[in-house]
Amino acid sequence: MINFEKMATNQIKEEHLRSVLVGVLHLLSEKDRQSFHFLIGRNVPRPIQDDPTFQGTLNLIETLFDRNKISVNDIYFLIDAFRKIGCHAIAKVLQDYQNQIQSNSGSSENRRLIDDLDLESDAPTVLLHDYRKKHIELSSSSKSTIYFIIVLLTLMGSVIIVFIFVNRSVPINVATNHTERMDCSMLPRNDNEIPIGAMSLSIEDRPLFIVGKKFGESNATKFDDSLRWNVNSLPYFYGFCPRVDSEGLESYQFFYASSQNQQPKIKSDVHGTQPKNSRSDFDFSEKNDRVIQVQGRLVKKSMLSPSGINQTINIITELEFISKTGRVSPLHIISVQKELSEKFSEEYEGYVLGYVTGRSAEYVEQIQFVWYRSIELESNED
């Protein structure tokens, strides 16, 4: 049986941690953020590493959550990173927060691990040595501000948790069933919404990249195509190869090209288990022809799980890519019951498709697109 009360508590804890992180990130200087992004390096995709704005740092933190580098019960990775760039006051705040979490969970082993972190030491880090010598620690007044923020957020979190437990007699499954009927996979998630007013800015002032909506809900294996390349220039979506089964449902393999056209084309893993068939590859090979819009369909399909239990999963199919010159990738039309499927579409003015992430098993069950600001690719090709 699903423990809805525990799920609600974990959600509150994660929202509390995110509030704490937003508070401390506001205290980072521009140089702090640059050093932080440089240190994190290959742990995140290159576009995120190269965007040390406040929004970029929020995206970096989100990526660390997605890749399980940090979690609601484990922020050692962040503590160590802030220590290494000389932000000892922030590291100390996060250490105190971690100690509090571990104290509440009763884990003496994890408490010993955090206590073993020497946050005041100056372990040699060659690449950051010159920066650390010049770095000025936060003043005592800034430290007081941080502690005040943490105390305030802790109180707010406690009030919310009390409210949840006082009202836990309300059947949670009623809200859950209502959410399922709404097909919330088609709605933008809060952590992926574009900042208010961002799209009204001039193209030069907009974010370097946009992480789009998540289409589909799934617990299948994650994939991230940006992990496939190790190049200096910025790869972008170039083409794809669908693999169609007898029902017309597809697995996908995506292709990427370097913005400087110096490296060979990069092929992603095949997302799904359908065998290769007569469907040919399709690419946008004309110079400067980039994908600016993606359309697709989310289909619900009943399948037997490995344990023999009948389950309904989401399947991403009928992906269609449209370029800025008007080219459209071919579409294999299938006959699906409309009540079991939902169309989706995504595009952002001034942005082109960068790469694809999602979750897959036998089919692609969830998909998310990362978009690049178009002037970045154009400047790389000049």
Image (cartoon, rainbow, N blue to C red):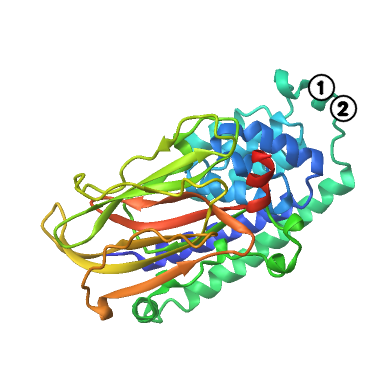
Q: Quadrant of residue 329?
A: bottom left
In the rendered structure, find residue 227 and report the number of the disc placed on it. none
- At x 66%, y 54%, the residue is 20
Quadrant housing the C terminus: top right
Residue 130's disc is 1
Q: Is the residue marked by circle 2 packed among few (<14), some (14-19), or many (20+) residues within 10 Å?
A: few
Q: Residue at (66%, 39%) from the top-left corner?
A: 380
Label 1 secondary element: helix
96 or 174, nearer to the observer: 174
Where residue 334 appears, as percent x and y from the top left, is 23, 68
In this view of the protein, which residue sits in the foreground, 26 or 323? 323
What residue is drawn where x is 22% and y is 47%? 273
Asked if disc 2 and disc 1 are in contact, CB closer than 8 Å, the reply is yes
The image shows residue 238 at horizontal and vertical percentages of 46, 46
Give the number of the disc on residue 134. 2
Image height check: is 296 above or below 255?
A: below
Residue 190: give x, y in percent of width and height. 56, 66
From the viewer's perspective, tell me whether residue 133 is left or right of residue 266: right
Placement of the N terminus among the 4 image quadrants: bottom left
Question: What residue do we see at 70% from left, 65% from top?
Answer: 198
Q: Which residue is most to the left?
A: 308
The span from disc 2 to disc 1 (Cα, nearest Å) is 7 Å
**Front-lying residue, 193 or 327:** 327
Residue 164 appears left or right of 181: right
Q: Is residue 258 visible?
A: yes
Q: Amino acid at mark 1?
A: Asp
Which amino acid type corresponds to the residue marked 2 in the rendered image? Lys
